[in-house]
Image: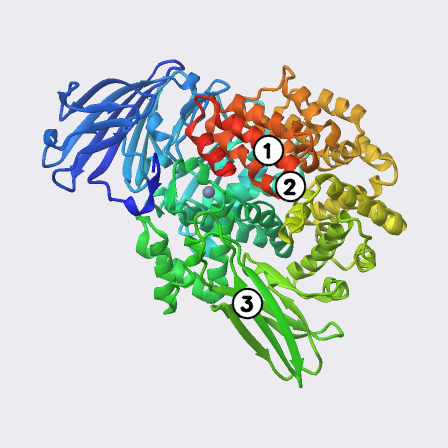
Amino acid sequence: MDGVTLLSDYKPYPFEIASVSLTFRLDPAATRVLATLDVTPRQPGADMVLQGEDLTLISLSLDGRALVPGDYLLDETGLTLPAAGLPAGPFRLQTEVEIAPAANTALEGLYMSNGMYCTQCEAEGFRHITFYPDRPDVMSRFHVRIESDLPVLLSNGNPVGQGPGWAEWDDPWPKPAYLFALVAGDLRATSGSFTTRSGRKVDLNIWVRPGDEDRCDFALGALARSMTWDEEAYGREYDLDLFNIVAVDDFNMGAMENKGLNIFNSKLVLASPETATDTDYERIEAVIAHEYFHNWTGNRITCRDWFQLCLKEGLTVYRDQSFTRDVRLGGLKRIEDVAALRARQFREDAGPLAHPPRPDRYKEINNFYTATVYEKGAEVVGMLASLLGPEGYRAALDLYFDRHDGQACTIEDWIKVFEDTSGRDLSQFKLWYTQAGTPKLTVTEAYENGTYTLEVSQTTPPTPGEEVKPPRHIPLAVGLLSPNGDEVVPTTVLELTEARQSFRFEGLAARPVPSLLRGFSAPVILDRATTPAEQAFLLAHDTDPFNRWEAGRTLARQTLMAMARGEGAQLDYLDAVGRLIADEEADPGFRAACLRLPGEDEIAAALFARGDTPDPDAIRAARRKLMKMLATRHGAALTRVYDSCAVTGPYSPDAGPAGRRALRLAVLALLTTEDGGARAAALFAEATNMTESIGALNLLVAEGKGQGQLAAFAARWSKDPLVMDKWRMAQGALTPPEDAAETVTRLGTAPEFDWKNPNRFRSLLGGFAANHAGFHRVDGAGYALYADWLLRLDPLNPQTAARMSTAFETWRRYDTTRQAHAKTALARIAATPGLSRDLAEMVGRLAG
Ligand SMILES: [Zn+2]
């Protein structure tokens, strides 16, 4: 196939590069990069292939002898040195190239953001900096010299020298090129230090542009908490004298774990109570932890090739989720993670972009930084942990670090450490890595003479390119409750390995109520005939916080599905919500999570899964109607909670006060459907933190109101683009559908909207993609507008354009009119000349 890379084609690189020395002479239009590679051939007769794109070759020499065209082959993908011209023993290769960072709008390789130089090399950005074997299994020691008049010059590792206009850095740990980083700019540090448990003192710096220094304290604290946690939970210490984090405004991703020099999207570093929400704080802490944890799971042990991306990402997401559960409220965090998994990964797995956590082919690797690789990858690690138990998991991880430190590894290496420490055969379990699709469990039950029998069958629907799906190895955590609400069988992990299996529980005094898939022990869809009364019972009594929430969620979803089909609301649900509102024993953050109704996309997916054609307008109307019914029925109790939950005193982003604010906003969302927005307007006027300010504004916008508040917000924050992103996101995501496309067009063409900045683009267009009824408008205006914007972005930043094209992954769910509009939009993108490889691959898969 054209341009396809296959896992089965992997071959080791035939040369070892023990060290590489780089000199950067920085200039916006003409940066010179001098590279010296110390090379040892490993395989006689092999050509040396070095990737390089958009580089101007100035000179090239081998052991000091200048090479001339004819000694090498140069094309648009790189440089090849034929075997015939290479020495049999070690040699030194030197290159000099010129690049233009200021013209680099793709934000891959070395580029400029508001006058500062920075890099992004994962996955294949280093080839835009110099000629090099740009693949993760080539690990070398990097020495870097930076020459520039800018005051702060940073690279990986430890600083080894500096003077006026230059600095040198040395990284003692061999690493692949994707972990290389360079930053140069006028930056200010917020500094601290950390002493590892073996006594190494590490200097910590958060670097930001002048004026942002007062928004770094939280990130610095989060870094120290992450370092402590990794020592305690995994026995992993930091291994350099210095850890730098730099905030950058123009960044394609969230953050990047470059060795000793993490580069972050500024929105994931900067936080103050006035500018960041509780959710932002939690996310900043989680991403700081995630990138820090990569120092061991990703950097010290890296991936052999990019097919193994989930080796580092699935594991590191699992680690950051565990960290957040430990430092905040564990039960609530699990609920949030599962809700996000279903919203993004289940949707991906059910559509044309479905792929395994470890795919076996790709055209453009940038298109595989997906919810499946990250979030499902984390679920797979979580299943290993629950199959082996905490001690078994820790023993396997200890062996993983001992055995593979300094190596570039595969999923096979990873599974082997679990097999070797547990003595178990995990070959069936491995299917989780190599096959796509979300398994469906169908459960039936029987009760007779004190014996309760669960019969579980599993099937996985076909996904593109994979028809046959053998049974998976699935940990199913189960508990049983007696009819009076006591737990009679505590959480037990059943192991499913066959298409159909039964499990018996004996000695029960009465027919129990099962609590299945506790803690969401596997990323599967559970199908079991149940009654609203039983769901309400579990919502009231289950000891597993996830399943309590799940019972309420299921009730809400079923009610909304029925209402979207024109049926009435279930009284069981309305009553259960009443009890929840009044339950002052329950954690406020948990009550908030239970009070939030399933989103419109979730309802559409559920209707589609049962064979209906979802109608976005009917879904939206049903959801709004149910909110209004809840407000009418429980108005007095909701008002009491709203009035009594106000958080006073200095702002803290901790789980306690954040949970109370979340509960108050969840209650306010219901009340706003009844009071004409009066309370939300009052909260907006008096809010002293961003959580309440943007929370109130969101509710007003969703009601088609809030023009005055939008203007006031813009007047206050117009100089702060990150805060204005929330304002744009609110309008893109929440403006009523009849005005949404027009609003997005107006905001997108305003002079202050810098659409080339990924954060700006994602806030407005990403918000719009989440505006379910607005994006899927029956006249096709949403699809057409979105296609226009992707085509505008693609020539400048293909990576972001391709990633955002996933808004189109659900078009087959809807009616033929909408499908026709979506097909037209996709065909128009596909037919555009000069489309990037990134977007072309995505559109092909989406339309296919
Ligand atoms: Zn990561």
Helix, strand or loop at mark 1: helix
Give the total number of marks visible in the rendering: 3
Residue at position x 23%, y 23% from top? Answer: 74
Q: Is residue 341 left or right of residue 160?
A: right
**Is residue 208 in sight in this rendering?**
no
Q: Quadrant of residue 128?
A: top left
User: Disc 2 beta carbon < 8 A from ligand 1?
Assistant: no
List the residue tagged with mark 3: 457
Q: Quadrant of residue 56?
A: top left
Q: Is residue 391 left or right of residue 84?
A: right
Q: Are marks 2 and 1 in contact (CB under 8 Å)?
A: yes
Residue at position x 69%, y 43% from top? Answer: 600
Query: How far from the left and from the top, in percent, is residue 836?
Result: 43, 26
The amino acid type of the residue labelled 3 equals: Ser
Depth check, front residue: 327 or 38: 38
The amino acid type of the residue labelled 2 equals: Tyr
Query: How far from the left and from the top, in percent, is residue 515?
Result: 65, 67
Q: Quadrant of the N terminus?
A: top left
- Between disc 3 and disc 2, the foreground one is 2
Q: Earlier in the sequence, mark 3 or mark 1?
A: 3
Query: How far from the left and from the top, in percent, is residue 463?
Result: 48, 50
Q: Are marks 3 and 2 in contact (CB under 8 Å)?
A: no
Q: Earlier in the sequence, mark 3 or mark 2?
A: 3
List the residue tagged with mark 1: 822
The amino acid type of the residue labelled 1 equals: Ala
Q: Which mark is residue 142?
A: none
Q: Residues within 10 Å of mark 3 (few under 14, many from 20)?
A: some
Q: Residues within 10 Å of mark 1 (few under 14, many from 20)?
A: many
List the residue tagged with mark 2: 814
Helix, strand or loop at mark 3: strand
